[in-house]
Amino acid sequence: MSEETKNTEAQVAEAVTETPKVDPAQFLKDFNWHNYEEGIDPIEDDQLAEFEKLVAENFVDTLSNEVVSGTVINITDRDAIIDINAKSEGVISLNEFRYNPDLKIGDKVEVLIDVREDATGQLVLSHRKARVIKAWERVNNAHETGEIVNGFVKCRTKGGMIVDVFGIEAFLPGSQIDVKPIRDYDVYVNKTMEFKVVKINHEFKNVVVSHKALIEADIEEQKKEIIGQLEKGQVLEGVVKNITSYGVFVDLGGVDGLIHITDLSWSRINHPNEIVELDQKLNVVILDFDEGKTRIQLGLKQLKQHPWEALDGELKVGDKVKGKVVVIADYGAFIEVEEGVEGLVHVSEMSWSTHLRSAQDFVKVGDEVEAVILTLDREERKMSLGIKQLTPDPWTDITSKYPVGSRHTGTVRNFTNFGVFVELEEGIDGLIYISDLSWTKKVKHPSDFCAVGDKLDVVVLELDVEGRKLSLGHKQTETNPWDKYETEFAVGTKHTLALEEVSDKGGTVNVNEDVQAFAPGRHLEKEDGSKLGKGETAEFVVIEFSKEFKRVVISHTAIFKEEEAKAVKQAAKKVASSNQASTLGDIDALAELKAKLEKGGN
């Protein structure tokens, strides 16, 4: 290079140095080289290009708010001196490098030109601002490209976690931490994890990241592989993901399957958590799945032999077994005699009593009971049991204990419209028909006569051993008062009574607490032609008595007409008994007598 060229370059450099506000590249572009051509050798194009390259490599654009790379050339107690190839070095407080305690001379750092020249002519730089700008560039780039970034989980917050990504605080929602529900968030604090930037709000400078998105991507691949290999009867290992009241969801490595509560155990259970717990590893068998293999039905109990197949082969009808009450219904109770093997005790087999009650009256869930095998079907896997068979049948010696005509005391158990069931002892019930409750009372419904739990004296009226039926009577324990009333109120007997009620049909009289007599309307007529009224006392004669129907009919009118009837009868008898032939005079005499009697009656 000629001496003239060197001088020219020196002049340009001096001009650039003395004019810091001028862009060097623009300066070189706009510089009028023709003013310097006189007395100078022409410059070749390749030489000019080399010079422009030299300027570009050794001088930086010192425009404000631009991030450039600098080199640490010195470190003091408070600051770091940074060279960015400008006319002067910049100073940055060490506070901005607290995240990097190992900072040393020679390290490359990114800085933002904050002020090109302060009052003292110093270049002011900022590493913190440069980091923020670069961080946002990297975050935006990661969001656009889907790049996986590392982040440091700083702390918990409402609904999720705070994660440091490139120096920016991003939000990690709780639902985006993992594919399975998170029960303890604290285990993730102070951990560095991989994330995917899923959302950026530029207006509010908010960043949302997800760790679950990375897992789902891996799981999706595993899921396709697993689904493609699914077969009924296949045994897989899984992890309990969720437990509900109706079953257990198991993670098969990206694919979820459901074990229904009935497929967890051969025994009855109230809730799946009696068998499994969260995060438990277990082997399951595939029972079924839909065409798309999105719903997979799993089984756990099917991995074990069916309990009925392991049931003692020597068990037979009539054998006694012990078991635990596992379920109670109104019609009976299920007894588990071995794990997964149950027998039903019908309520009718719990007691010899023919009066059926609810199974809850005899046993409760959890009771240990003994029973007798009544039926056993190994093919259908059904067994019926009986408890009452453990005690003797009370009907065995019924004829000697309760012969017809014997008296006993029983307990009222329940009613029907036609009678009362009375229990004489456990297993022995008898029926008292409503007509056998009282000799005198008119009972419309048995509940009007007695109450459940009452003690009643009874007499055995009939006994049907084969039909297990016992007919009882209560009124038979007392003498029938109508036997006495049959004499006391015989037809023709007279009584002085007071009318208590009067109606169009007649009047009634309460003779005593058992007998109510009735006088038809025409029999209330007095001798003077008027009728008896309510409250009047008069003499009555019984004209009808029925012991069977408990009916007494009386008449007042017959009292005075009785004398008339007697006179007519006597006259007729006298005429009939006479041996003389009847004459017209006799007839006239009889007619005259009749007329007199009729006149007196009026």
Image (cartoon, rainbow, N blue to C red):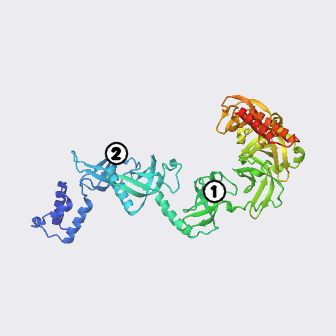
In this rendering, would 301 be left or right of 379?
Answer: left
Confirm whether residue 474 shows in the render: no
- The amino acid sitting under disc 2 is Thr
Confirm whether residue 172 shows in the render: yes
Residue 565 falls in which quadrant of the image? top right
- The amino acid sitting under disc 1 is Ile
Q: Please tell me how crowded label 2 is: few (under 14), some (14-19), or many (20+) other residues with Cα within 10 Å.
A: few
Residue 286 falls in which quadrant of the image? bottom right
Question: In the image, what residue occupies the spot 60% across and 56% down?
Answer: 248
Q: Please tell me how crowded label 1 is: few (under 14), some (14-19), or many (20+) other residues with Cα within 10 Å.
A: many
Rendered location of residue 7, percent (x, y): 16, 62
Q: Which quarter of the figure is the N terminus placed in?
A: bottom left
Question: In the image, what residue occupies the spot 68% across and 62% down?
Answer: 303
Asked if 168 appears above or below 53 in the picture, the reply is: above
Residue 481 falls in which quadrant of the image? top right
Asked if 122 appears above or below 15 in the picture, the reply is: above
Q: Which residue is at the front of the view, 500 or 319?
A: 500
Asked if 385 appears above or below 481 in the picture, the reply is: below
Q: How many marks?
A: 2
Distance CA(mark 1)–CA(mark 2):
71 Å
Q: Which residue is at the front of the view, 376 or 30?
A: 376
Asked if the residue at tag 2 contacts the one at tag 1, i.e. Cβ–Cβ closer than 8 Å, the answer is: no
In this rendering, would 588 be left or right of 132?
Answer: right
Q: Which residue is at the front of the view, 126 or 279?
A: 279
Of all residues, the one furthest to the right in this rendering is: 400
Question: In the image, what residue occupies the spot 72% across and 57% down?
Answer: 340
Q: Which residue is identified by label 1? A: 261
The circle drawn on residue 76 is 2
